[in-house]
Amino acid sequence: MKTADAVVIGGGIMGASAAHFLAKKGFGRVVLLEKGRLAGVSTGHSAANVRTYYSNPITLELAKRALHMFENDREALGGDCGFRPVGFLLLIDEGSRAAGEHILKSERRHGIEVERLTPEEVGEIAPQLSLDHVEYGILEPRSGYADPVKTTEALVEAGRAWGLELRIGVAATGIRCRGGRIVAVETEDGTIATNVVVNAAGPWAGRVGAWLGLKYSLRRSRESDLFVELPPGFGPLPVVSDPRLRFYLRPQGDRIMVGLGAPKEIEPVDPDDCDPALDPATRDRIERALFGRIPSLASARHLGGYASIYTITDDWHPIVGPEPAIEGCHAFLGGSGHGFKLAPPIGEALADVICGEDPAIDLSPLRPSRFIDGHPLTSAWGEGNRG
């Protein structure tokens, strides 16, 4: 039987972050199990936006720490994560005014650099946008986007020097307990004796929890993005979020990535049978929103798209922390659309918790029992993945 000081199940950004920071803290031999490829599902298809506009203290602090980490990716995350600080622009209309004001005040209260822009100032930053119904803009000048695959690979590669062992193509098949504590993880390639396991299995996290009799309330939704070629001379754009038209976009060289924003319907999906193709109806919904805000792109060339999976908790925030009934079992699941940017600071803090230390950011608001305790997280936006 092989042995490990910790086994992390799932090679997306959450699993990679947990494994990286456990190894960095000198926890010992940390085995990261990934049945497919690193960042192969939700993480690899993430828009990877790094922004701080949140409305509750825990996510604000995590997002603030995340921005610092991506700005200093080689030191903080182990390598080049492809971070591009192009800015993040939120377009506020009458319907989103109250949420916008709340978030603007919250960001400033937490020491986050943010600016309120008049429509004229929005037009100076992004002259390509139609400003119909825009009352003002909220700009995070340091925010932007990263490369989700490069980020995941950097975390894992850097962790190898500290004892992280990546097992690609090896699926976990079960978890053994004895006397209420973790004793081993079963895999397709044999059993690994360990007293610590982190469930970061993304869309399959509910299945992993069920091995231990844990029941997570999770929904899995099909999520799609498309790419549009930018015409010559189009000019630079920040990442843009448009609550009125319910879409977001981010630049990527000579193209932009575009997807639907919250609130939106849940599209149930089987993670074992998710068609990665962008369907015509979803493409039409995304393009109608995009062309409503940037009419000049109506004749731009469509460059394809894809569909992937969100794993969504009941309050649209991750479930993180030790499971009280099972010693050595830790949850790190349910990104709900926030997972990419929040995973590194959560992984850092969770590693402290596992090592018996006080984390710089208290993760208790994300604890698995918060729903039973009657303390779900709330959002100024209501239900949805803006947070």
Image (tube, rainbow, N blue to C red):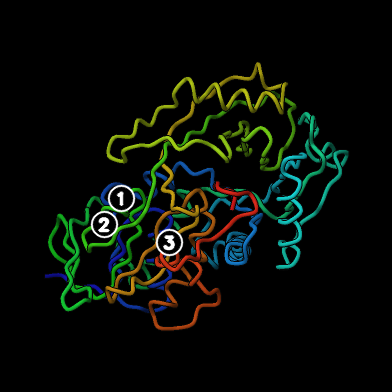
Residue 9: x and y in percent read 30, 59
Residue 360, compared with residue 302, is above or below; it is below
| Residue identifier under label 3 | 319
Give the residue drawn at x 42%, y 65%.
Answer: 320
Displayed quadrant of residue 370: bottom left
Q: Secondary structure at mark 2?
A: helix
Whether residue 123 sits left or right of residue 155 in the image: it is right
Q: How many marks?
A: 3
Any mark on residue 204, and which?
A: 1
Q: Secondary structure at mark 1?
A: helix
Give the residue drawn at x 62%, y 39%.
Answer: 250
Mark 3: which amino acid?
Answer: Ile
Viewer-nearest residue: 54 or 373: 373
Query: In this view, which residue lies farthest toward the top?
Result: 299
Viewer-nearest residue: 249 or 135: 135
| Residue identifier under label 2 | 208
